[in-house]
Amino acid sequence: MRGEQATMPELVALSLPPARPEPVPGCRECLGFAVQRANAVSIGDYSKVSDMNVILRAHLRDAHGSE
């Protein structure tokens, strides 16, 4: 590198990810999404964990008016 700057010119501010969505007690769909998420965690499939969080948040918003 011929005198090129190897660092970023400005600091990058990162925030914490949103809290993990929790299923509504008694809702079978919520429970199903939470079980799929737990299974994904158990095998280290964090892409699926993220997907299930997105799906559960959407379900909570659409079916339960929360999140």
Image (cartoon, helix red, strand yellow):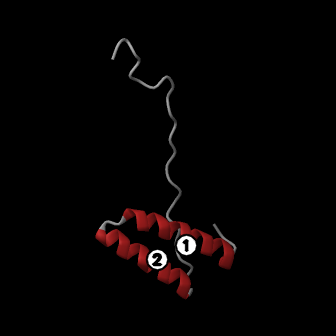
> Residue 15, which numbered label?
none
Residue at mark 1 to residue at mark 2: CA–CA distance: 8 Å
The residue that label 2 is drawn on is 34
Graded by Cα atoms within 10 Å as few (under 14), some (14 to 19) or many (20 or more), the crowding at tag 1 reads many
Q: Quadrant of the N terminus?
A: top left
**Helix, strand or loop under label 1:** helix
What kind of residue is marked 2?
Answer: Ala
Q: Secondary structure at mark 2?
A: helix
Note whether 17 is above or below 26 in the view shown: above
Q: In this view of the protein, which residue sits in the foreground, 32 or 65? A: 32
Q: Residues within 10 Å of mark 2 (few under 14, many from 20)?
A: many
Q: Quadrant of the C terminus?
A: bottom right
Q: Earlier in the sequence, mark 1 or mark 2?
A: 2
Residue 54: x %, y % from top left = 54, 66
Farthest residue in the front direction?
2
- Left-right relation of 30 to 44: right
Q: In the figure, residue 40 lies in which quadrant?
A: bottom left
Q: Which residue is mark 1?
A: 56
Q: Quadrant of residue 36?
A: bottom left
What is the x, y in percent for residue 12? 50, 33
| Left or right of residue 65, residue 57 in this image | left
Name the kind of residue labelled 1 in the image: Leu
Image location of residue 59, percent across then percent down: 61, 75
Q: Residue at x 45, y 26 (%)?
A: 8
Tag 1 near tag 2, CB within 8 Å: yes
Q: Please say if 9 is above or below 15.
A: above
Residue in the foreground of this view, choosing between 30 and 26: 30
Q: Residue at x 52, y 45 (%)?
A: 15
Residue plotted at (35% across, 69% down): 41
